[in-house]
Amino acid sequence: MVTERVPTGQPDGAAATRFGHALAALHAAGAPAFGAPPPGGPEEAYIGLAPMRNAPRGDWPGWFAEHRLLPYLRRAVDAGTLRPAEAAVVEQVCERLPELAGPAEPPARLHGDLWNGNVLWGADGEVRIIDPAAHGGHRETDLAMLQLFGCPHLDRVLAGYQEAAPPADGWRRRVGLHQLFRCWCTWCCSAAATPNGPSPRPAARSRNERNEGHRRPAGGARNSPRLRRRPPT
């Protein structure tokens, strides 16, 4: 596949405002349903290294729980990196999604993985968004993604978006809710890149081990609980 090479430039406030306008236009293009893949796109897709299922559904809270939160939650529990009692907290959030989601909105056409690394600032003063995980979703999800890892001139991007298509009241309170999916995806990508998956509870080190210059005995890392392979199931 051959694509255009875009020389990169410095982030610019005016370009950020135009980016906000353009993102609003992308969302306004709409989608047939929440979870609908782009035309000709696959139902079984990926976001980074994590699988992502594009299965259409009519309501956003139910779709977000079924296809964006619960599958990754089950992965975390099955891998032993999350206790069932901890998973129950996320399940409670899923049950409350209808009341937490805010006013109902029609499906928007999302970029789907709109973190700062997928925002390309061109030398021509324009912004391109790359490496999408496109699907029909809630437009606040893209806005929340931009804020997850930071974005240059984020205030100008959001101001431009609000000029073109103001989000529903209370949208800033829902940012964390919309970031849940990408947080789980980050965990899944880490699990795929690590033979035994990431551990949220690394083994505590002794004070001597934390001291600068301390050398772990040969073979110590191999016997660490963090790196020990789990027996096959």
Image (cartoon, rainbow, N blue to C red):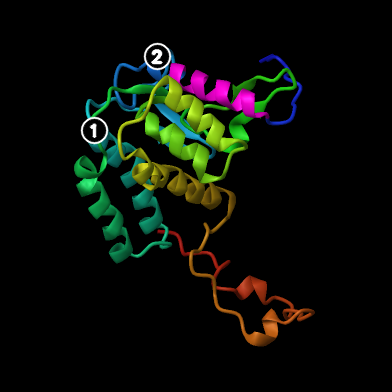
| Residue located beneath label 1 in the image | 103
- The reply to whether residue 41 is visible in this rendering is no
Magenta span of residues? 12-25
Closer-to-camera residue (48/211)? 211
Q: Residue at x 40, y 55 (%)?
A: 76
Label 1 neighbourhood size at 10 Å, few (<14), some (14-19), many (20+)? few
Question: Taking 2 as reference, is 102 above or below it?
Answer: below
Q: Percent x, y for residue 213?
A: 79, 79
Check disc 1 and report its element: helix, strand or loop.
loop
Closer-to-camera residue (34/170)? 170
Q: Image quadrant for the C terminus?
A: bottom left
The amino acid on which the numbered mark 1 sits, given as a three-letter code, is: Pro
Question: Taking 72 as reference, is 9 above or below it?
Answer: above
| Residue located beneath label 2 in the image | 29
- The reply to whether residue 78 is visible in this rendering is yes
- How many tags in the picture? 2
What secondary structure predominates along the stretch shown in magenta?
helix
Q: Percent x, y for residue 123?
A: 75, 22
Check disc 2 and report its element: helix, strand or loop.
loop
